[in-house]
Structures are given as C-alpha cells and as structure tokens.
Amino acid sequence: MNASGVRTGWRVIQGRPDFFSITKKMHNALQGASINITELKTRIYEEVAHENAVRNHLDHDVVIVHDPQPLPMIQHYRRRAPWIWRCHVDLTHPNPELWSYLAPLIEQYDAVVLSLPAYAQKLTKPQRFIMPAINPFSTTNRELSDSEINDRLSHHDIPTDLPLVVQVSRFDRWKDPQGVIEAFKIARKQVDCTLVLVGNIATDDPEGQEVFASLCRSADDRIRSLGPGLGAR
C-alpha cells in the first residue's frame, strides 16, 4: 500500500503471558469452544488494551483493528476517523457468553469486516465480507526452482519416493492437524504417500508448543511434522 502511495503503518500490541492465555481462550471460544468469563479475565484483557492505547498514538484517516486481542482499545481514543474491526476467525457459532461480552465493544466500531457471509452476526453496524488473499510479492509465496525445492527436502530429510501430502498452517487445534493425520491414514490405504505438516508457533499462542508436541508423537516414517527451528520429526 505504501508503494502505491497509500501511507500505511502497522502497530503491534504487547501483552503479558496471562493476557495472551486469555485471548487464546477467546480466540477458541469465538469459534465455538467453551469459556469461563470471569471478572479477573476481563480486567486483565481490558487493562492490557488500555496499556497499548497509551503507548500507541493513532491520528489517521482510518484505523483497522485486527481480531479480538486489541478490540477494547477503541474506548481510549478521541476518534476523528472511521474505525473498522477486521475479524479473521470463524464466527459461525461463537460462544454466546463471550459474544455477549464482546458485542458492545464491536458496536463501537464504524464497520466490521469478515471473511465470509456465513460469519455474519446480529450487529447494528455494517458488515462487509472480504476473502483472505496472499501477497504474490512476498518471499513466502515466490516460486521455487527444482534445485531449491530438492535442497529443502533433503535438508529436512523429507522422503521423495512417494507423493507428498502437505498441510501448511500454524500449529493450532483449530487448523485440525490431528484430523489431517487421521484423514491421511485413511487415504494412504488407497494411495501410498507421505504426509508433511509444516507450520510455525505463534508467539501469542500458549497452546502452540503443546499442539506441535502432540503431532510429533504421531510421527512415523511417513508422517513428518516440521516447525521453525525445530526440524522435522
């Protein structure tokens, strides 16, 4: 956007481990998991949002707030421009208790952007739908040569004698990597192949390491899990 003449900047929030533990539970609950909303949890959540609002001075033509973690920050600004809440998670069946707590915060925004019409909720503010897209200029998405591909496969000791089935995602239960493994076990009864689960562990996700460890316990010669700095297992 900056390259096209739209002056744009990112602000990244900071938080304590207990804050990220709470927001992870919220992330799961927005997708339907159960959650116990307590006064302590909401106080920590709102305190950290206030701390981030103090350190982030926002005076822009439009402000886009991503996902539930920084949602309450809107309460701490004298708004001179539209604020938009961009939710990246599946809101098909949000936990009712959590939604009743977050909805009044969401209603303070001028608009909400969701990924699919199926995620729409009962809100008074406009809801728009923009499907996710990739940046074709990112290093992550550039085309690799055959020699580069073979070098990476060799480096991580990934066998290439059979077709590869690959899942690329964060190590998150909501990406259902265990379900991918179970589906793979069924599929390879018909077509012999190798499964590779490639991903990373988000710094704000206290469950990521646990998910990766559980996948490693499912590893065999034809099921490999590959994480950043962790190697293939």
Image (tube, rainbow, N blue to C red):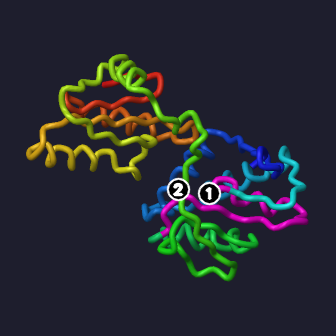
Which residue range is magenta in the image? Answer: 66-91
Q: Position of residue 4 (x, y in %)?
A: 77, 49
The amino acid type, in three-letter code, at marker 2 is His
Q: Residues within 10 Å of mark 2 (few under 14, many from 20)?
A: many
Please name the amino acid that badge 1 sits on: Asp
- Residue at 75%, 45% in the rendered image: 10
- Position of the C terminus, as image quadrant, is top left
Q: CA distance from mark 2 to mark 1?
A: 8 Å
Horizontally, is 99 left or right of 213 in the view?
right
Q: Nearer the viewer, residue 94 or 125?
A: 125
- Residue located at (78% from left, 65% from top): 83
What kind of element bears circle 1?
Answer: loop
Name the residue that disc number 1 marks: 67
Q: In the depicted view, which residue is nearer to us: 96 or 78?
A: 78
The reply to whether dot 2 and dot 1 touch (C-beta < 8 Å) is yes
- Whether residue 51 is visible, yes or no, is no
Residue at the spot of label 2: 27
